[in-house]
Image (spheres, rainbow, N blue to C red):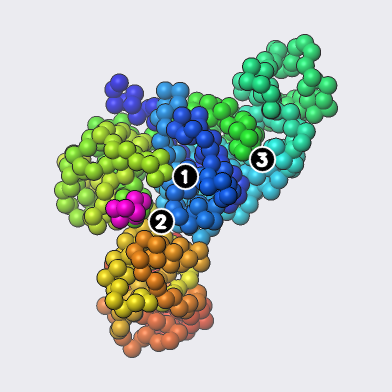
Amino acid sequence: MTLIDDVNSRRTFAIISHPDAGKTTLTEQLLLFGGAIRAAGTVKGKKTGKYATSDWMEIEKQRGISVTSSVMQFDYLDKRINILDTPGHQDFSEDTYRTLMAVDSAVMIIDAAKGIEAQTLKLFKVCKMRGIPIFTFVNKLDRQGREPLEIMEELEEVLGIESYAMNWPIGMGKEFYGIYDRYHKRIEQFRVEEDQRFLPLNEEGELDGDHEIKNSSFYDQALEDIMLLNEAGNEFTTERLKNGEVTPVFFGSALTNFGVQTFLETYLQFAPAPQPRKTDQGEIEATEEEFSGFIFKIQANMNPAHRDRIAFLRICSGKFERGMPVQLSRTGKTIKLSSSTSFLADDRNTVDNAVSGDIIGIHDTGNYQIGDTLTGGKKNFAFEKLPQFTPELFMRVTAKNVMKQKHFHKGINQLVQEGAIQLYKTYRTDEIILGAVGQLQFEVFEHRMKNEYNTDVMMENIGSKIARWIENEEDVKDSMSSQRSVLVKDRYGKLVFLFENDFAMRWFSDKHPEIKLYSLL
């Protein structure tokens, strides 16, 4: 195969949703089809000792939630699929935002009973902003939920995107018979033998002959709804999907593995192959010969036995070969990529070759930062910056045992490089303050310091603050720091004021109009 064929066979997507909509369950079923796993561990199966494959961190297994983005790769129908399962919890939305920078399309899961929830809306907006095509999977049809037309209407009103039903449910909950597959012109029956699963439709879009399903009023209702959608529904084209004007909608149940295969096969037909990427020197085509990529995530201790650290690299052009030299754009340094892995959550295999669209892990001894660009050719450029959020909650942190300072500082430095928590030191005394977008991040930090670095920490909550960076640092004086506007340094040595509240920030700006403040995202 040529490089172009290889790249065009890649499909790289993230799964986004509100917590508990069924994101990790859907991921598992997709992995089953790819032959990547033999049995799906239900997320809630604490007593059975079964856990979701994509939830590899100890705290995820304990709580049954995803708090890190995991990467899984498998082959299906001549395509190589890279799935990024993102944290649903809003405290970890920063990790999810960065993950969305590394994909070419997104699958949005909606709970049929709850409709569009807060976190889904937030993540949808990021996809829209980035122009990422979105596929929608309406989940949990095996339970009673809202009317399908109501869900379609909500998609359009709340998200401001046209929707196109690829299939349509026949009944719901205890009276769920299956789906009317508009795209494949067939009915897929629920809970029947495999050889009876698909029933073909005739030219009029109805079933010929006698079928039990035809005696149900839900079948008649589905036909009526389909007629309405055919006459008054939105238009679906690949072009409109690519431009983010329409989202194809699929109905199903991830837990019972119903409608998932139909969704996957249709998704693979319409999802985009790796797309061009913006750099500070124009766009780079995915099929260009020269290798390039960027680091969107750093994860420490994926292998607790080795205390290692992995940088996740999205390849954006050309071909990766293990052992190849690359240039780190930020420093101009040449690095040999000799230790590289592909993933199935925490299962790892050495990868010798990969192409644009693939996500690989490279061993990190402290060279990389989130957002770094790596290039293999003579050109030195940088991909567009990844979002970094202004933290809102702050904790003062110290080691309980003074003798464990070395472990304490190593743990903090490594976990800070993952990007979920931000590190600050007080200007005068170098006390450590951590900032985060959500409370759960601190809990995960404390848990991991104890379990991965064998260090108990003391955390003193100093509450929510307004963090502001300074454009003209040279004009800042030590005397400007006070209890209500604490002067600190971030991990790059930049000066930051932590204001107690809006009033304190306004008061500071009135008193020191010469100091120009700014925030991150």
- Tell me if 241 is positioned left or right of 229 in this view: left
The amino acid sitting under disc 3 is: Lys
Q: On the image, numbered disc 2 is attached to which residue?
A: 387
Residue neighbourhood size for the residue with mark 1, other residues' Cα within 10 Å, grouped as few (<14), some (14–19), many (≥20): many
Q: Residue at x 71, y 17 (%)?
A: 205
Label 1: which secondary element: loop
Where's residue 248, x and y in %?
59, 33
Where's residue 247, x and y in %?
58, 36
* Dot 1 and dot 3 residues touching (CB under 8 Å): no
Q: Residue at x 17, y 52 (%)?
A: 332
Query: Bounds of the magenta span?
Result: 301-309
Closest to the camera, between mark 1 and mark 3, is: 1
236 above or below 342? above
Where's residue 51, x and y in %?
51, 46
For the N terminus, give its image quadrant.
Answer: top left
Res 165 visible:
yes
Mark toward the start of the polypeptide (2 vs 1): 1
Residue 32: say if magenta.
no
Q: Residue at x 65, y 28 (%)?
A: 167
The amino acid sitting under disc 2 is: Pro
Mark toward the start of the polypeptide (2 vs 3): 3
Distance Cα–Cα, label 1 vs label 3: 20 Å
Q: On the image, numbered disc 3 is attached to which residue?
A: 140
Closest to the camera, between mark 2 and mark 3, is: 3
Q: On the image, numbered disc 1 is attached to which residue?
A: 54
The amino acid sitting under disc 1 is: Ser
Toward the viewer: 186 or 310? 310
Residue 306: say if magenta.
yes
**Quarter assignment of residue 281:** top left
